[in-house]
Amino acid sequence: MTVAQRLKSQGFIAFAVAVLLFLIFTGSIAGTIGFMLIFGIPLFAMKPMPPYSTIAEKVGKYIFLTVCTVIFIFLILPILVIMPLSLNAEPYFSFTEGMMALDPKAYSSRWYSDILRFGMTAPDATAGWWSDMWNNATWVRAFRNSFFLAIVSTALATFLGTLAALGLSRPEMPFRSAITSLLISPMIVPLVITATGMFFFYGGTMQGVIPGYPEGLAKTYLGLVLAHATLGIPFVIITVTATLTGFDRSLIRASQGLGANGWTTFYRVIMPLIVPGMISGALFAFITSLDEVVAVIFMADVDQRTIPRQMFSGLREQISPTILAVATILVIMSVVLLTTVELLRRRSERLRGMSPG
Amino acid sequence: MTDATLSGMDNAAQRAGADKKALLAADGTPLKQKLARTTRRMKFNAFMLTLPLVLFLLVSFVFPIGEMLVRSVYNPTGSNVVPQFAKAIQDWDENEGIPSEELIEIFVKDLATAAKNREVGKTVGNLATRINYEIPGSRSLFTKTARKVRRLEEGPYKEALFEIDKKWENPNIWRTLKRVTRDYTLSFYLAATDRKFDPDGSIVRADELYQIYLPILWKTIWLSALITALCFIIAYPVSYLLATLPLRTSNLLMIMVLLPFWTSLLVRTSAWIAMLQKEGIINNILVYLGLIGNEHRIQMIYNATGTVIAMVHILLPFMILPLYSVMKTIPPTYMRAARSMGASGTYAFTKVYFPQTIPGIAAGTLLVFILAIGYYITPALVGGNDGLLISNLIAGHIQRSLNWSLAAALGTILLVVVLTLYWVYNRLVGVDNLKFG
C-alpha cells in the first residue's frame, strides 16, 4: 500500500467518524448531508501525492480542496436555489416548511402562468385570450421589447465590430492601441456615466441652448438600440480579435496569388475562420443587451420596459416569485448560450489547429 | 508584411541605390517611393475598416459623455431666465454693496417677464432652484418676489424690492446672483467635493451637515477595494485548482465559473436577496443548525454587507478568468524543480510560483476594481442606505432631485478616476489581453 492510498483510507475512516459525530451532535439529516458534501468531495478529489510530500502538505492539500469546494458552492448555489424557489406555492422568496418536507401541495407553477397573465385586461376570458396576452401582459411585453432590442442592437454591433476587428488585426493598422482603447471603453466606463451622457444627449436637453442641436431620441427604440449596440461592441471586438490572433496571414497572400479578388478572399478564406468568433461575440453582445438595465432606466418609456427593467422595479416595489420564474427562464437561456459559445470556441481552436481535441 | 521587414527592405534599397541607380518598380517609379505609397494605402485601408465604428462610437458614446462634461460646468439658467440682467450685472462692482437703481430696474423687468414664462428651463422656478443650491432656503425669496413684481408698474424699483422682502437689502444675495448668472461655473464641482463659494467668492468647506459626497466617494473606493481584495482571496485558490487539474476536469469545473458570468445580473441579485434576507436560506440554515436563535436572525441584506457579498459573487469571474489564463501558462516543472533543489512547499510557492502570477493579479484586480467603483444596480437593490455607492447618488440626481449639473460633475469625477485606472490597466496589461472564456 502506498503512502497516498494509506492516507486516503485513513482519511475516509476519519471522515466517517466525523460524519457520525456531526449527526449525533446536531441530529439533523440535511445538515449532515451538507457536511458530507463540503468535506467529502475534497476527499474524493484527492489524488495520490508524490512520495516526498510531508503530512503537513497532505493536510494542506485537503484544506485547499475543501476551500475550493466551498467556493464552487458559493458560485453556483445562488443560481441553483432560485429554480425550486420559483415553484413556491406561497408568494415568498423563501422555502416554506411544506417545500422542505417535499409536500406536493407546497409546489405550484402559478408564477409561471403569472408571467403570461400579469397585466392582462381579462386573464380569465376565453375569447381573445391570446391577443390580450400578447398585447397587454406586462412580462410578455417586456420579453418582446428585450428580444427586439437585443436582436437589432446585436446585428448592428456585430457588423460594425467585426469590420473594425478586421482592421485592428492588420499589422499595418495605424494608432492601433489608441483606437482599441477607445473601442473597448464602453465596457470600462461605468454604465451610470454612459447612461447619464446618453440621457442628456439623446434627450436633446441642449436643444434650444445650442443652435442646431439634434432633436431628442429619448423614449424611442432607436435611442435604445444605439445605446445597447454601443455597450455590446467591446465584446464583439474582443472575441473577433481573439480569433484573428494567430491567423496565418500568408493564407491571404496565397489566396491572392491563386487569383482570388479581395471579396472572394474574404468570403472563402477569412470568413470561415472568424465566423466562430463572430457568433460568440454576437452572443456576448446579445446577452449584454438582454441584461442591460441602466440605460433603459434612464431613457426608456413605460411601455418600452425590458425584462431586467421589469425585474428591477419588481425587486424594488413588490417582490413576487414571478421574478424568480423569469429568472429561471433566463438561467436556462444562459446555459444554452454558454454551451453554444463553448462549442464554438472549441471548434474555432480546432480550426486554427491550436488544440488537438 | 510587418513594419520591420518593410524597413529592412527600405535599407536594402538604400544600400543598393548608393552604388547603383535607384531600383525601379515595374512601372518605372523608384521602388522606395512605390513601397511608401503601398504602405500608406495599406494603412489607410486598415483604418477605413475601423472608421464606421469609430464614427458610430463618436456619436453614440463620445459626444454623450462630452455633453456630460460640458454640463458639469455650463449652466445657462441665469441667462435663460433673466437675460438682460445676467449681462448687465457682470459689470457691477461687488464692493458697491447694493446695485444701482438702473440695474435693479433691469432685474425687476426681467423677473416680471420670466414670471409669465412657462417654457421648461426658463421659468423663475428654475432660477430659484439654481440659487437655492448656493444659498439654501432662498428659493421662496425668488418665487415670492417674481409673483409680486408682475404688479409693479413703475419705480423706484429699489424701494419696491426692499418692500417685498428685507433680504434684498443683503449684499450677499446680489454677489451670489452675479456669480450664478454666469453661464460657466465651477460651483457644481465644489458641491460635488463638499465645498462651496462664500458670499465674497472664496472657497470654503460646506457645513458638516451637507458633507455627503466626499464621504460617499471614499466609501465607494473603500468598498471597491474590499470587494477586489475578497475576490482576489477567493479567486486565487480556485484559479490555481483550475489551472493545475487535467483539461477535461477543469473544463467541467470552468462551467461553474462561467455560468454565473453568463447569467443576468438581475437574476444573480434576486438570487442573493433570496439567500441573504432575514427569512432567507442562509439565515434558515443557521437557525436550523442551531447556530443562532430564531429571533436573532442576522440582517445581511439592505446594507453594505449585502452589497459586498452580492458584488463579490458577481465580479468573481472577472478575477478568476485573467488569473486562470496566466496560471495556465506556468509550467508545473518549475515548482518541481524548486522542490527537487530543496525548497519547502511554501518557499517554492512564494519564490517561484507566486511571482509568475503577478501579471494575472494585476489584470484581475484592476478590472474588478474598475467595474466595482461604477456599480449601480446591485447597490441600488441590496444596498439599503448604508451600501449605496457614488453611482447611486448620480442616478438619484438625474431621476429624483433633477440637479443634472451636479450629477454631471459627480459623473466627471468618477469618470476621471475610472479612466486613470483604465490607463494604468492599459499600460500594465494591455486591452488586447482581455478575454472571456
Image: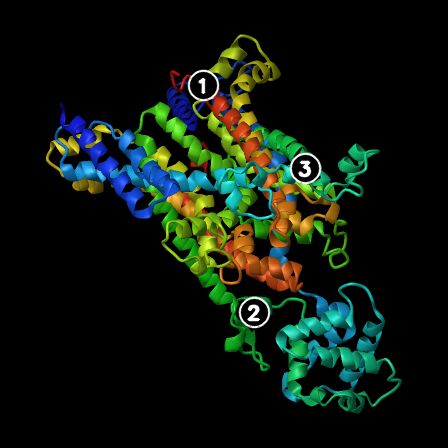
Looking at the rendering, which quadrant does residue B291 occupy? Answer: bottom left
Residue found farthest to the left: B342
From the top left corner, tell me how far across and down residue B300 is, in percent: 45, 56
**Are the residues flagged by discs 3 and 1 from a single subunit?**
yes
Q: Residue B410, position in %: x, y?
A: 56, 61
Q: Measuring 41% from the left and 47% from the top, which residue is drawn there?
A: B366
Q: Which mark is residue A248?
A: 1
All told, the count of numbered labels is: 3
Q: Mark 3 vs mark 1: give the one in front.
A: 3
Q: How is the image coloured?
A: rainbow
Mark 2 vs mark 1: same chain?
A: no
Residue A228, image x and y in percent? Answer: 63, 40
Q: Secondary structure at mark 3?
A: helix
Which numbered disc, 3 or 1, marks the residue that appears first in the sequence?
3
* Left-right relation of A186 to B219: right
**Which dot marks residue A113?**
3
The image's mark for residue B191 is 2
Task: Indicate the amino acid at tag 2.
Answer: Ala
For label 3, count other residues whose C-alpha is less than 10 Å away and answer few (under 14), some (14-19) or many (20+): few
Q: Chain of mark 3?
A: A
Q: Chain of mark 1?
A: A
